[in-house]
Image (cartoon, rainbow, N blue to C red):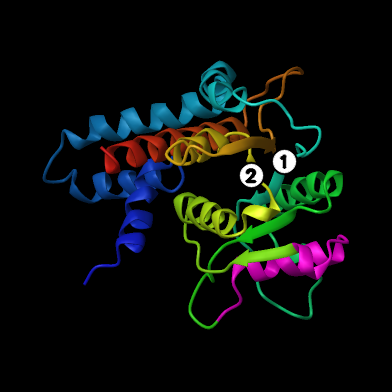
Amino acid sequence: MIDGFLLKKLVSVFVHFIPGVPVLLLLCLLVRRWLPKFSYLMSLMLCMLLIASTVPGVFTKVASSLEDQFEVLPYAPADTGLILVHGWAHMISDKALPINTQLYPVALTRLMEGVRLWQTKPDSMLALSGAPPRSGTPSHAEKMHEMALLLGVPEERIIRFDLSLDTEDEIDSAVAWLKQNPQQGSRIVVVSTAMHLPRSEAVLGKYGIDYSMAPTEFTISKGGLKLPSIYPMVTLDRAIHEWVGMLWYRLKNI
């Protein structure tokens, strides 16, 4: 039986500029001997890479449409019961290395913002999520838990969703926990990359509960010189991934 989650991840490779376009370029290179017209497709994809990396206005417009939807949350509202930090990934699991070096910068930034908001309402719960990268290894939630303790969050204020595979899993788990613990509060605060939060809101919308969005890890610079680099392409790549993710969620729930 095909693993649906694994299949989704494999398909998502082609949603990204990197490695999607290079993989498609390689495939075109292999078949163009028999199908010469694929050379035109290769030229088109190379142009896409060039535009994405050298025309700032392209990535700024697409990414800003996602990033600008929510303002920074200065503090957790009074009715907050749960602060959910969306997981990302950890680079390595090695007890010989400091835990902050094991987490990807995106995960660390999300966690720092979650802890900052928890400090404004320390009677709320901090929820950390993320499944193990492979069988027999620590979950991402476990790694985030370890870092949260170092940042001063008490053990009794942390809960983990160690089996959450994606955004929908994380939110489903958080809502279920809050409904089982109504005395804790009625609101969920969701902490994630600013560009990712519209997808989180799309999932939360089906529950009809109180929630607040807490954006962090902004990728769009509001000023300064825009020079050609790989950075715009990476940003545009992430924005397209989020749009496709929202489209997939809506199609799945028609």
What kind of element bears circle 2? loop
Q: Is residue 138 magenta?
A: yes
Judge left or right: residue 91 versus residue 170. right
Image quarter (top left, top right, bottom left or bottom right) of the N terminus: bottom left
Judge left or right: residue 216 versus residue 36. right
Query: What segment is highlighted magenta in the picture?
Result: 137-157
Q: Position of residue 229 (x, y in %)?
A: 62, 32
Residue 186: mark in rendering: 2
The residue type indicated by label 2 comes to Ser
Residue 105: mark in rendering: none
Q: Height in image: 17 above or below 114?
A: above
> What residue is at 53 percent from the left and 67 percent from the top?
131
Q: Are marks 1 and 2 in contact (CB under 8 Å)?
A: yes
> What residue is at 75 percent from the left and 36 percent from the top?
77
Q: Which residue is mark 1?
A: 79
The answer to whether residue 38 of the structure is visible from this angle is yes
Image quarter (top left, top right, bottom left or bottom right) of the C terminus: top left
Please identify the quarter of the rendering in which residue 246 is found.
top left
Q: Residues within 10 Å of mark 1 (few under 14, many from 20)?
A: some
The residue type indicated by label 1 comes to Asp
Q: Position of residue 46 (x, y in %)?
A: 39, 32
